[in-house]
Image: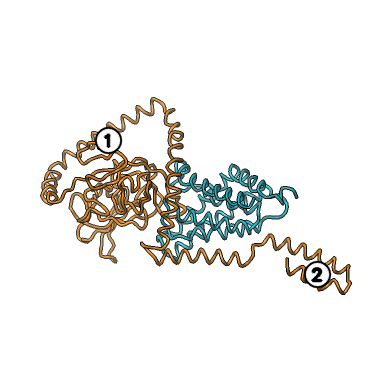
C-alpha cells in the first residue's frame, strides 16, 4: 500500500508538471500558468497532513527545478514547496475542510510559494527583476491557482483520501 | 511510542489506575497532535536539502553537479512533454477553424498592405544590401558557412513564475542538436540551446534576463550587446547597449546578430528586432536602445536549430540552399 501510495503520488506530480509545461502555455497570460504542482501539494497537505506534504512538496519542487525547460538555480522550488506543504498542512483540522477554507488555503499557499521562489531569486541575484513586476506575476499566479482550484483540488483530495486506509475507515 | 510504553510501565506498579488512565488519555491526544505536525527533524532535513541543492547549483555554474540530474529528468520528462504537446496541439487549434470569413478577409487585406510596405522598404535598402552581400561574400567565402536547419517544434514553455524564459523543443542530440547552437524561426532570432537530451533540448530565449546577444544595427553597422529584460509586456523586451556613445541608432533600424568566429552561440546576420526607442544617459557612457523583437515569444511553435552542413540527423534537414535532405 505504501508503495502504491508513493507511486501514485509521484505519477500525479509528474502529470501535473507535464500539463503545466505543455498544455497550459496555450492558455497562459503573458507566460503565467497555473502552478499545478503546488495545487497537488496543497491537496496532499489538506488530506494527509504536513508530514506527508513536506516530503511530496520537496519531490515536486525538485522535479520543477530539474525537468526541462527549467533553467533557474535548482532547489528554489523545492524550498518553496516544502514550506507550502508545511503551512497548508497546519491548516488541516480533523474535520473535512470547507470549500472556502480550501480556496483560502490555495490562495495563501500560492502567494507564499511564488513569493519564496521570487525572494530566493533576488537573494541569489539569479535574474535581476523589478519588484513591481514580480508582484504582478505573483498576483496573476494566485488568481490562476484559485481559478483552477475547483477543477484540480476535489479529484486530488479524493485520490489522497482513498489511498489512506485509516482515514477512509475512521 | 516506545517512550510511552516505558513510562506506562513505570507508573503501573504504583497502582494509581485512575490518574494513569487520565494520563494515557492526555497522551493519546498529544500523540494525535504530534501526528499533525511534521517532525522537526524531517522539516530541518528537507529545508537543508533544498539549501544544499541551491548552493551546489549556484556555486557549480555551468558544470554544476546537478547537470547529470537535469539530464536524467530531461530524458524522462522530455518525451512526455513531446507526447502531451502532440495531443494538445490539434485541440487548441480548433477555435481557429471557427474564425469567420470576414476576419480572414480583413487579415488578408492587412497582410497585403504590410507586404507592399515591406517591398517598398526593401527596394530602398537594396543598395546597402548589395554592398553588404559583397563584403559578406568576401569574408565568408573562406570558411564553409553553409548552415543547415533542423526543424523542430516547441513542446514546453517555462512558466513566468520561474522568472526565466526557456522552452523545450522536440529535437535533441539524435537530431544533431548540440549546446550553444542558434535557434531561429521565420521571423528572426529565438535563442540558443542550453542543454540537450537524446530527444529534446532546452532553449534560452533572447528575452530572458540572463541572455546576452552580440547585436549590430543594420544601417550603421554599429555593434553592441542585446540584453533580455525578462519582462512580461509584449513591447520593449530587449535592451541594446551600444559600444560607441557618439552614434545614436535611429528608430525602426533593424538589429541583426553580430555573430562570433566559430558561429557559436549565435551565427551572424540573423534579424533580431527593430529599434523602438533610444535613451542616452549622461551618467553611463553609452546609448541604450529598446528593441522590439521580430519573434512573438508568446506563440512560438515551429523553430529551426542552426547546425553545420552535413550533420547527421534523425529527421529531414533544411539545407542552406533550401532543399530538404
Percent from the top left, x then y, of residue B194? Answer: 35, 54
Q: Nearer the viewer, mark 2 or mark 1?
A: 2
Q: Provide the secondary structure element on which disc 2 rests.
A: helix
Percent from the top left, x then y, of residue A146? Answer: 57, 47
Query: Which residue in the protein does label 2 denote?
Result: B8
- Mark 2 Cα within 10 Å, few/some/many (few <14, many 20+)? some
- Colour displayed for chain B in the image of the structure: orange
Percent from the top left, x then y, of residue B150? Answer: 29, 43
Let me know if residue B179 appears in the view.
yes
Say which quarter of the image contains residue B297: top left
Q: Is residue B38 above or below residue B133?
A: below
Q: Which chain is cyan?
A: A
* Quadrant including the N terminus of chain B: bottom right
* Residue in front for this viewpoint, A90 or B28: B28
Query: Which residue in the protein does label 1 denote?
Result: B114
Q: Chain of mark 2?
A: B
Say which quarter of the image contains residue A155: top right
B38 horizontally vs B199: left or right: right
* Residue in front for this viewpoint, B14 or B107: B14
Disc ID at residue A16: none
Amino acid at each position: 500500500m505504501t508503495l502504491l501510495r508513493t507511486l501514485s503520488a509521484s505519477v500525479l506530480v509528474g502529470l501535473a508538471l507535464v500539463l503545466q509545461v505543455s498544455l497550459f502555455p496555450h492558455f497562459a497570460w503573458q507566460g503565467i500558468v497555473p502552478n499545478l504542482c503546488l495545487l497537488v501539494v496543497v491537496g496532499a497537505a489538506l488530506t494527509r497532513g504536513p508530514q506527508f506534504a513536506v516530503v511530496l512538496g520537496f519531490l515536486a519542487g525538485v522535479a520543477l527545478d530539474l525537468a526541462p525547460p527549467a533553467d533557474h538555480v535548482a532547489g528554489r522550488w523545492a524550498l518553496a514547496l516544502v514550506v507550502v506543504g508545511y503551512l497548508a498542512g497546519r491548516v488541516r483540522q480533523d474535520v473535512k475542510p470547507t470549500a472556502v477554507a480550501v480556496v483560502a488555503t490555495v490562495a495563501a499557499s500560492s502567494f507564499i510559494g511564488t513569493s519564496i521562489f521570487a525572494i530566493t531569486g533576488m537573494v541569489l541575484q539569479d535574474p535581476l527583476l523589478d519588484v513591481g513586476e514580480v508582484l504582478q506575476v505573483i498576483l496573476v499566479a494566485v488568481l490562476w491557482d484559485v481559478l483552477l482550484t475547483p477543477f484540480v483540488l476535489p479529484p486530488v483530495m479524493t485520490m489522497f483520501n482513498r489511498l489512506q486506509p485509516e482515514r477512509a475507515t475512521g | 511510542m516506545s517512550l510511552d510504553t516505558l513510562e506506562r510501565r513505570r507508573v503501573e506498579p504504583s497502582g494509581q489506575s485512575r490518574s494513569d488512565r487520565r494520563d494515557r488519555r492526555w497522551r493519546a491526544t498529544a500523540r494525535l497532535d504530534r501526528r499533525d505536525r511534521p517532525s522537526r527533524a524531517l522539516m530541518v532535513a528537507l529545508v537543508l536539502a533544498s539549501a544544499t541543492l541551491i548552493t551546489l547549483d549556484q556555486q557549480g555554474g555551468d558544470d554544476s553537479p546537478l547537470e547529470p540530474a537535469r539530464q536524467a529528468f530531461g530524458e524522462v520528462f522530455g518525451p512526455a512533454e513531446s507526447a502531451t504537446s502532440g495531443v494538445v496541439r490539434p485541440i487548441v487549434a480548433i477555435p481557429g477553424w471557427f474564425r469567420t470569413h470576414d476576419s480572414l478577409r480583413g487579415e488578408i487585406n492587412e497582410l497585403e498592405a504590410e507586404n507592399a510596405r515591406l517591398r517598398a522598404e526593401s527596394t530602398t535598402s537594396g543598395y546597402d544590401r548589395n554592398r553588404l552581400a559583397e563584403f559578406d561574400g568576401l569574408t565568408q567565402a573562406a570558411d564553409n558557412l553553409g548552415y543547415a536547419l533542423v526543424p523542430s517544434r516547441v513542446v514546453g514553455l517555462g512558466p513566468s513564475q520561474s522568472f526565466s524564459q526557456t522552452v523545450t523543443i522536440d529535437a535533441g542530440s539524435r537530431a544533431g542538436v548540440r549546446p550553444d547552437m542558434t535557434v531561429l524561426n521565420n521571423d528572426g532570432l529565438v535563442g540558443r540551446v542550453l542543454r540537450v537530451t537524446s530527444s529534446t533540448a532546452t532553449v534560452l530565449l533572447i528575452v530572458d534576463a540572463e541572455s546576452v546577444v552580440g547585436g549590430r544595427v543594420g544601417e550603421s553597422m554599429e555593434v553592441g550587446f542585446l540584453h533580455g529584460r525578462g519582462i512580461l509586456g509584449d513591447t520593449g523586451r530587449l535592451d541594446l547597449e551600444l559600444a560607441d556613445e557618439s552614434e545614436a541608432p535611429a528608430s525602426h533600424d533593424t538589429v541583426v546578430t553580430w555573430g562570433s568566429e566559430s558561429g557559436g552561440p549565435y551565427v551572424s546576420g540573423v534579424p533580431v528586432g527593430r529599434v523602438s526607442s533610444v535613451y542616452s544617459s549622461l551618467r553611463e557612457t553609452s546609448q541604450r536602445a529598446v528593441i522590439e523583437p521580430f519573434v512573438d515569444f508568446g506563440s512560438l511553435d515551429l523553430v529551426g536549430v542552426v547546425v553545420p552542413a552535413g550533420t547527421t540527423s534523425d529527421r529531414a534537414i533544411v539545407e542552406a540552399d533550401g532543399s530538404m535532405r
